Image (tube, grey):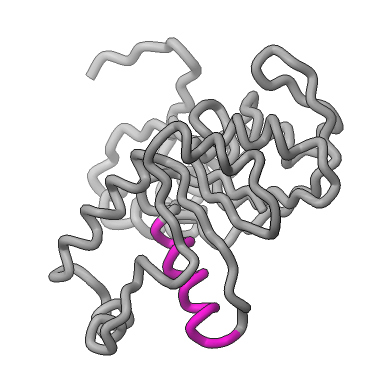
Amino acid sequence: MLIPAFALGRTQDLIFHIGEFLRSGRLKSINVYVDSPMATAITDIYKRHREVFDERATQLLAQHLSALNFPGLTYTRTVDESKRLNVATGSMVIISASGMCTGGRILHHLYHGLSHPETHVVIVGYQGQGTLGRRLVDGARQVTIFREEVPVRARIHTLGGFSAHAGQSGLVDWAAPLAPSKPRVFLTHGEDGPRNALRAQLRARFQLDAAMPGYGEEVEL
């Protein structure tokens, strides 16, 4: 199983939830590899700052357990360790960056794994238009990696529940206390369909006419 994941936040969420499945008995023991130097470094920072752990993570510490570790979890650090995963046998989960499959070690794992029907790719984050991750989500049967055509025989799964962004209703609620001052609003992050829908909501609710700048457009403030 290959999981492209953002190194900051998303990878740590995945480690925590896989650990919870194992601790509750809902998942049998399995080898999980975090193959991203940045994700590994960030996880080390998380571990050092226990003062900001939530109630469940603090509870695990009291039980001499870790929210960011469990039996079978390995953090790879070197290039050679990463390469060995591509020739390893047996079941495993590889969590690797980048989250949209635009670079990093995940490309090597996809290059070696996409052509095999027994490979599962689990998408756990937003995939921007034009990215390799988006092409996989959209059902491409062949993709280009390292200038080579790779057939997609792997099974692609999408989990939307890990999104770190507010939805439309959350963004409208966030804008509500600002609306009376009639601020200038720019909708810059997202695709045109959702941006248009949000702009319509802001106009209907608060009479705010939000701008939708395009790539390379400049605005003087």
Q: Where residue 38 appears, x then y in whole percent?
A: 34, 39
Residue at (63% x, 37% y) in the render: 109
Give the main secondary structure, helix, strand or loop, of the magenta stretch: helix
The residue located at (52%, 40%) in the rendering is: 99
Is 16 magenta? The answer is yes
Q: Is residue 20 above or below residue 204?
A: below
The quadrant in which the C terminus is found is top left
Q: Quadrant of residue 110?
A: top right
Q: Quadrant of residue 7?
A: top left
Q: Is residue 10 magenta?
A: no
Is 83 located above or below residue 158 in the figure? above
> Which residue is drawn at the image coordinates 26% and 50% (left, top)?
178
Q: Nearer the viewer, residue 199 or 166?
A: 166
Span colored in magenta:
12-25
Q: Position of residue 13 (x, y in %)?
A: 43, 62
Q: What residue sits 47% from the left and 78% below the top?
A: 20
Residue 102 place in picture, x, y as percent: 55, 27
Q: Is residue 14 left or right of residue 51?
A: right
Query: Is residue 109 toward the left or the right of residue 56 in the image?
Result: right
